[in-house]
């Protein structure tokens, strides 16, 4: 199972970086606990909280009636922690 698929870069996610919150697209079957454990092990940081939401994709054609959903997670770290891949 893929953990985070990629980082999400939007105006909102850049604003959240100032509050020490990081946004990822993740596998839709991933739970908050699995994500927390993965982030803490890989980046050696302490996670304060996680918010998750499902984002529906737009239907592009009538033939493709299956609309897949994506999952987005916003990870809030303690004030003394940061992920070096992102700009603060």
Image (cartoon, helix red, strand yellow):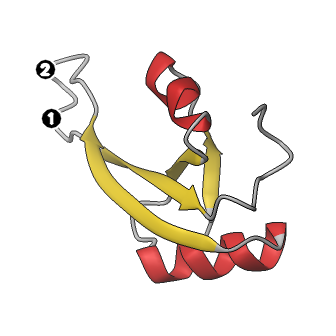
Whether pointer 2 and pointer 1 mark residues with C-beta atoms closer than 8 Å, the reply is: yes
Closest to the observer: 81 or 24? 81
Horizontal side of residue 7 vs 85, given as left or right: left
Instruction: Point out residue 68 in the picture as x, y percentages from the top left corner.
Output: 29, 44
User: Could you tell me which secondary element the residue under label 1 belongs to?
Assistant: loop
Gap in angstroms between the C-alphas marked 2 and 1: 6 Å
Residue at mark 1: 65
Name the residue located 28 percent from the left edge and 41 percent from the top edge. 55
Instruction: Point out residue 12 in the picture as x, y percentages from the top left corner.
Output: 44, 24
Closest to the observer: 79 or 53? 79
Quick one: quadrant of the C terminus?
Answer: top right
Name the residue located 71 percent from the left edge and 76 percent from the top edge. 40
Name the residue located 60 percent from the left edge and 34 percent from the top edge. 18
Which quarter of the figure has residue 86?
Answer: top right
Horizontal side of residue 45 vs 12, given as left or right: right
Horizontal side of residue 3 vs 11, given as left or right: right
Residue at mark 2: 62
Name the residue located 52 percent from the left edge and 70 percent from the top edge. 48
């Amino acid at each position: 199972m893929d953990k985070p698929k990629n980082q999400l870069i939007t105006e909102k996610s850049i604003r959240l970086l100032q509050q020490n919150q990081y946004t990822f697209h993740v596998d839709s079957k991933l739970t908050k606990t699995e994500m927390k454990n993965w982030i803490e092990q890989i980046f050696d940081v302490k996670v304060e909280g996680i918010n998750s939401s499902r984002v529906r994709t737009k239907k592009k054609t009538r033939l493709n009636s299956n609309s897949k959903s994506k999952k987005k997670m916003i990870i809030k770290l303690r004030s003394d922690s940061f992920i070096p891949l992102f700009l603060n």
